Image (cartoon, coloured by chain):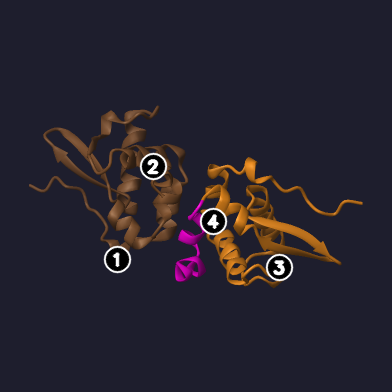
Chain colours: A brown, B orange
Amino acid sequence: MERTPPHPDVSEFDLQQVLEALVDPVRRSIVTQLDAADGADIACGAFDINVSKSTATHHFKVLREAGLIRQHYAGTSRMNTLRRTDMDQAFPGLLDALTPHGRDAG
Amino acid sequence: MERTPPHPDVSEFDLQQVLEALVDPVRRSIVTQLDAADGADIACGAFDINVSKSTATHHFKVLREAGLIRQHYAGTSRMNTLRRTDMDQAFPGLLDALTPHGRDAG
């Protein structure tokens, strides 16, 4: 039984799709919170975002399909990690430019 | 007679507004073409974009209001330059990450 949703390979990343994901402030907040977690995974329910559960689910799906996050199940929780290395490889500097954490480090 | 349209100061640049400007592929193409011009100005009619004149005018307005381009008249032509220094100051690395020219240089 495969419970991991599909993820694009780095070679499939598309700048237009990534920007459409990142233009939404809630999705950018999710990315920023993951970036601040320094590689740790965060459960979907543990983010500081003020949207309904179904809206949040949609946002996570958009981020996953764009290649920005990786999702996996841990028991009944869906966990999320930032695909920073993959994004940095595909679009160097983009996440650094968009996340306060990246800007501080840079 | 003031013929220069209003431009935001760097201190007024807003990341959300900049991303909304850059998420459009035609507007990103305008930015990329200006970036490749290395500081030279380009008349509105001289860009390689396949849109109507009124649509193009809208795109230039969005870019100008976000702070991405500076516009001025030269005779009857409206000329455009990329506000690269201002953008690099406000959002370091963003244009580099989004323009092939920036990526090559980096």
Marks 3 and 4, the one that precedes in the sequence = 4
Mark 1 or mark 3, which is nearer to you? 3
Which residue lies at the image location 64% right of the left edge and 46% below the top edge? Answer: B10
Label 2 secondary element: helix
| Mark sitting on residue A11 | 1
Per the picture, the main secondary structure of the magenta-coloured stretch is helix
Label 3 with label 2: CB-CB less than 8 Å: no
Q: Mark 4 lies on which chain?
A: B
Which residue lies at the image location 46% right of the left edge and 39% below the top edge? Answer: A25
Mark 1 or mark 2, which is nearer to you? 2
Residue B52 x %, y %:
68, 64
Label 1 secondary element: helix
Residue picked out by circle 2: A101
Of residues A20 and B80, the one drawn nearer to the viewer in this rendering:
B80
Please check whether the numbered discs 4 and 2 fall on a single chain.
Answer: no
B50 versus A26 height, above or below: below
The amino acid type, in three-letter code, at marker 2 is His
Q: Quadrant of residue A3?
A: top left
Measure the alpha-carbon separation of dots 3 and 2. Answer: 35 Å
Asked if one can make out residue B43 in the rendered structure from this viewpoint, the answer is yes
Q: Mark 1 lies on which chain?
A: A
Residue picked out by circle 3: B41
Label 3 with label 4: CB-CB less than 8 Å: no
B72 versus B5 height, above or below: below
Label 4 secondary element: loop
Which residue lies at the image location 50% right of the left edge and 52% below the top edge? Answer: B92
Q: In which quarter of the image is residue B51?
A: bottom right
The amino acid type, in three-letter code, at marker 1 is Ser
The segment highlighted magenta reads B92-106
Residue picked out by circle 4: B24
Measure the alpha-carbon separation of dots 3 and 4. Answer: 21 Å
